[in-house]
Amino acid sequence: MKKLYIFLLIFSTQLVFAQIRFQNIPENAIYPESRAIETITANIAYQGYEETQAYFGQGEYEIFLDNVDGVLDNPIIILDGFDPGDSRGIPGLYASLSFGGQNMADILRDEGFDIVILNAPVYTTDGKTIDGGGDYIQRNAMVLIAMIQQLKADKVGDNELVVLGPSMGGLIARYALSYMENNTLDPETRLYISFDSPHRGANIPISLQYLINYFAQQVGDATAQQVVDQLLNSPAAKEMLTDHLLGHLLAGSTYEQDPTKLLPMGAPGFRNEFQAELDALGFPNSVRNVTMINGAGNGTTTGSPGITIVDTNLQIDAFTDVDVALKFTPAASQTNTVTDVTVNFFGAPIDTFQTTAQSTNNSDGVDSAPGGTGSISDALGDGGGNQVLIDFINALQQDLYSFIPTMSALAIDNPDWFAIPNLSDSPFVNFYIPTENEDHVTVTAASAQFALDEIRNGVMSVGENQFLNQFILAQNPVQNNIQIVIPNNVSVKKLTTTVFSITGQKLMHQTWTNANGKLTWNHNLSTGIYFLKLQHGASVQTIKMIVE
């Protein structure tokens, strides 16, 4: 046994993990021009599930005033997502809004909006060091509440706030806004944009979790241990991951799997508790809730259930090599070996490690589900200059996996991760959904246009007319024609109507003048879900429409 650990020590000195990342900054990204960073502290403390006392969360923020009058009068809060170690910082968060040589923040500032970037740094409070980018979602939400209250006091005029939450930031925003409403604190927020946020949970392949944890616990790799401690076992990861290695470990072991725990299981004491708390809070009622996601809405998968991720032999040194095979979780009701490792010394095996996964009866394994994608090579920092990891990455047969499933980003509670989403089951009132799976929290020209339209229309509308449902459909679901009912007290000199697919494609467009009573609009739309946008003067209204 002692000889085994000596060999494993040799192995561990070679295999060093690089910086894990879950959000890439686009190429040719546009960064902000200033660095006037301020600190903000929550005025509501939060006590985590495993903590013995409550702590006041902290954040750091920077206000990028608009380029029109330079006055803080139209704030849009952009939140930090999951970022243990604070590798992005405020400049990276600003730059992440770049697309096609433009930056959405710059566009909005040129139109008179003020951008407020709220970052979650590493900080120390009451003797405890807290990594904000991986901390409890609830404590970060308390920081956002303090930010909202400060902006309410500092801004000029009556314009309400807009909150855009990418990734985990969308959960922070949802929690904060709902918490404020439930505790008689006016959020003064007109629009909440969730951006590929895991409302029903996130996913990192359990095979990869097992592998990294094995290197940390059994091999003794210090950097792998740091990844386990800082990332996989962070409070936020344990709250969000629908399948977490801590739910599968054999009693008394730090890395071996309990053979009776094969089905997906979240981190004990975290995952189910957080989801129940989030569900109980619901969504803010006084706010327009919309979402832009990166997962496909038409059932396009990310690979296939049970597919091989990698099956290779890695040469560590002249004497030591390791066989590594990883797979996606299997098809519904099926079981497979997801992690298979053998360490060889002079060709003889000196240690083996295997884990098994079983999928539920209701769904194929989530690794290959439609969703905003994560990348294994990104998770390994592209190898970080380590040749063994570079060889591992080069041997990957499947690099992408479903990180934020489409169902989760739409906040639809459906046990089948692969089902075509029924948008009537989603709490959001408007959506941007692509037809292909995109990298997690990637801004495209189409999704940027969706967000810009939502932000602009709220300012253009008079008295929040877009929420008053002044136009209705006589029938919904509709059949051979779309019948739009105009209330008797509304004078319509010009009404523009547009039908969009769930992916944002414009399908029909017509302008009506001097309209009254009921408009009948023939169509040849296929059966499905669409969005009917009606623009009457400065008022914009969107209706979810089902065609039978």
Image: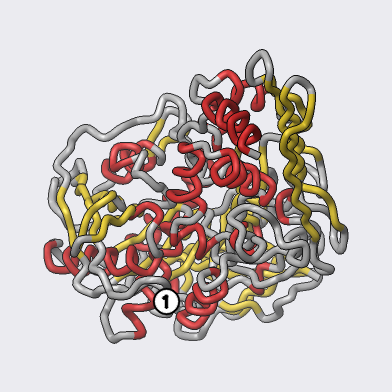
- Kind of residue sitting beneath label 1: Pro
The residue sitting at 60% across, 44% down in the picture is: 218
For label 1, the residue is 284
The residue sitting at 58% across, 63% down in the picture is: 201
Give the tally of numbered discs. 1
Front-lying residue, 27 or 308: 308
Dot 1: within a 10 Å radius of its alpha carbon, few (fewer than 14), some, or many (20 or more) residues? many
Q: Is residue 360 visible?
A: yes
Residue 215 located left or right of residue 468? right
| Horizontal and vertical percent position of residue 281 | 45, 80
What residue occupies the far right of the structure in this picture? 334
Front-lying residue, 248 or 427: 248
What residue occupies the far front of the structure in this picture? 2
Residue 150: image quadrant is bottom left
Image height check: is 264 above or below 178? above
Residue 312 located left or right of residue 517? right
